Image: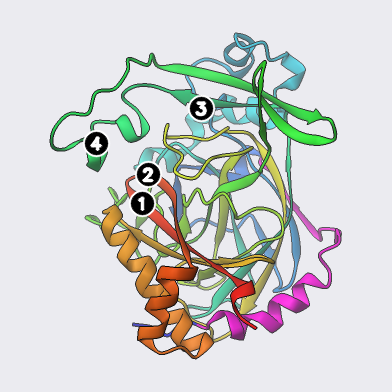
Amino acid sequence: MRAHPGFLVLAPILAAICLHAAGPAPAVHVRSTPENVVLGVFPIDRAPVATVASGTVVRIDTLSQRGATQQEDPVTFLGKFGVKPDEVLQDVKDLWASRNAKPQGERGGGGHILTGPIFVEGAEPGDTLAVEMIDLTTRVPYGINSTSSTSGVFAASYPGAAGEPIPVMEIPNTNHLIRTGVENGHAVAFVADNIRVPMHPFFGTMAVAPDHPTVGQPGVRTEGLQTSGPPGPYGGNMDFRDLKAGSTLYLPVFHRGALFYAGDPHGTQGDGEVSGNAIEQSLTGVLRFTVLKGKTINGPRAEDAMNYYVMGIDLDLDRAMRKSVAETIDFLVKDKGLTPAKALSLCSIGVDFRIAEVVDTTQVIVASIPKALFR
């Protein structure tokens, strides 16, 4: 097992990054035009859409697949929900018009629209890529959430479907268009006349190019090509709601340049994403990429001002939990100087283990470790 760099090793670099976090101007703008996006896969051989130096701030436009990948043209489809033609992004119209010219989607891809890859100079296998979320903003004043009594945790393919049936109320297959905006100075989603949900924009999917996917691994139906459905060591469809502005994601590098992809943008989401999706809403992100040379981790980690985050990802929710606890113990021993016994004790009395998502084949448990515990 490769040794991870540990958050104490990363902290001086994060501190240097944060000195400039008050709105630095992006040096590069990667637009979500048809030539800059790929449908549902993380190719390791796709030509970069941008090449940047370590430390560069990049603006990345992303598109929600909801309203952009259906059979009906976007203006007609979204118009049925009251969306005006001028509220439909031109990028969405262009992508829909070019959909038959997107060969990547025919190679076994999932449903997400992914912008990338971005090649980060100096990144080599065995390094870590730090991705700082400086700003995340919505591009349109609406998003879509869909529900059904046969989707998300109620899907026949969900592991919990095995065994004695659990009664479920009949829920028709429904798309809910949810308007978003500002009310009383707060960004909210207008879920119903008497329901407001705070906005919490984040990218559901952020990834580096995976390490030579092989058929038989989760989400690999074509040799060398990982689909965007299940998350894994490369990151991917983690759907972890706290990867918002002010957080930093750490991803292991498997290929030269890291080859970073972003997509599956969300306006807000609850832990679990139990219907199978969040408020799927196109976003623009301002991110800073920093290569941590010689710092090796086994899978995605993150931190913000309040917490360290350690992820456990597995096909089985119980195993994901065990992996998250094991990785947290590893962090507490190597970075905080605890004995393994003391680390497990702290895990039980001072660390929260949260479900990030459970509906994307592999499931994600996140250990939330308060920084305030350590003096």
Judged from the image, the secondary structure of the residue bearing numbered disc 1 is strand
Using the image, determine if residue 118 lies above or below residue 281: below
Alpha carbon of mark 4 to alpha carbon of mark 3: how far? 23 Å
Q: Which numbered disc flags the more N-terminal residue, 3 or 2?
A: 3
Q: Is residue 213 visible?
A: no
Is there a contact, CB below 8 Å, between mark 3 and mark 2?
no
Alpha carbon of mark 3 to alpha carbon of mark 1: how far? 25 Å
Tell me the crowding category of disc 4: few under 14, some 14 to 19, or many 20 or more residues within 10 angstroms, Cα based: some
> Which contiguous range is marked in magenta?
5-32
Residue behind mark 4: 157
Alpha carbon of mark 1 to alpha carbon of mark 4: how far? 13 Å
Residue behind mark 2: 360
Alpha carbon of mark 3 to alpha carbon of mark 2: how far? 19 Å
Q: Which numbered disc flags the more N-terminal residue, 4 or 3?
A: 3
Q: Please name the residue shown 64% across and 42% down the image.
A: 62
At label 2, which amino acid type do we have?
Asp
Q: How is the image coloured?
A: rainbow
Q: Residue 39: horizontal and vertical position, in percent? A: 48, 40
Q: Residue 240: horizontal and vertical position, in percent? A: 52, 51
Residue behind mark 3: 69
Q: Please name the residue shown 53% across and 41% down the image.
A: 270
43 inside magenta stretch: no
Alpha carbon of mark 2 to alpha carbon of mark 4: how far? 10 Å
Is there a contact, CB below 8 Å, between mark 4 and mark 3?
no
At label 1, which amino acid type do we have?
Gln
Rendered image quadrant of residue 316 = bottom left
Query: Dividing the image into 4 quarters, which one contains the N terminus?
Result: bottom left
Judged from the image, the secondary structure of the residue bearing numbered disc 3 is loop
Q: Which numbered disc flags the more N-terminal residue, 1 or 4?
A: 4
In-image side of 364 versus 191 (left or right): left
Using the image, determine if residue 132 lies above or below residue 66: below
